[in-house]
Image (cartoon, rainbow, N blue to C red):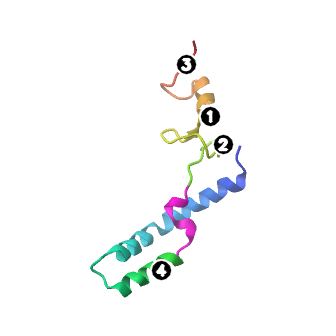
Amino acid sequence: MAKKSMIEREKKRERLVAKFAAKRAELKEIANDETKSMEERFKARLKLAELPRNSSATRLHNRCQLTGRPHAYYRKLKVSRIMLRNLGSNGEIPGLVKSSW
């Protein structure tokens, strides 16, 4: 089980990314637009730098929904390999059969 503080920190980042997504996209569009003046593009870059760092989507890290484990994460099911094995063994994931030979 991951530390609760790490799980909460990740939730906070998700909220910040959602909150600033539109503003960040707008500023990036202005900053990358070659038709705009150099001064206007520079101002957009400065405003982009003033946004919270945790509002950037690259700061997000996938975590298991059940345990908070950051490694061995299955995107489709949003769980780690360990929980996938446990849930599969208990028959709680439809269509998943644990192999045995």
Q: Which mark identifies residue 67?
A: 2
Residue with the most extreme bottom position: 39
3 or 2: mark nearer the eye: 3
2 or 4: mark nearer the eye: 4
3 or 1: mark nearer the eye: 3
Q: Which mark identifies residue 83?
A: 1
Which residue appears at 30% of the width and 82% of the height? Answer: 36
Name the kind of residue labelled 2 in the image. Answer: Thr
Residue 64 point in image, percent of width and height: 60, 43
Given contact means CB atoms under 8 Å apart, are the residues at marks 1 and 4 in contact? Answer: no
Above or below, 53 against 35 in this view is above
Tell me the distance, in whole angstroms, between the alpha carbons under discs 1 and 4: 42 Å
Q: Residues within 10 Å of mark 4 (few under 14, many from 20)?
A: some
Which residue appears at 57% of the width and 12% of the height? Answer: 101
Tell me the distance, in whole angstroms, between the alpha carbons under discs 3 and 2: 24 Å
Name the kind of residue labelled 3 in the image. Answer: Ser
Name the kind of residue labelled 1 in the image. Answer: Met
Q: Is residue 7 a member of the stretch shown in magenta? A: no
- Which region shows up in magenta? 51-60
Residue 84 picture quarter: top right
1 or 4: mark nearer the eye: 4
Tell me the distance, in whole angstroms, between the alpha carbons under discs 1 and 2: 8 Å
SS at mark 4? helix
Tell me the distance, in whole angstroms, between the alpha carbons under discs 3 and 1: 16 Å
Tell me the distance, in whole angstroms, between the alpha carbons under discs 2 and 4: 37 Å
Which residue appears at 70% of the width and 47% of the height? Answer: 2
Residue 58 point in image, percent of width and height: 51, 59
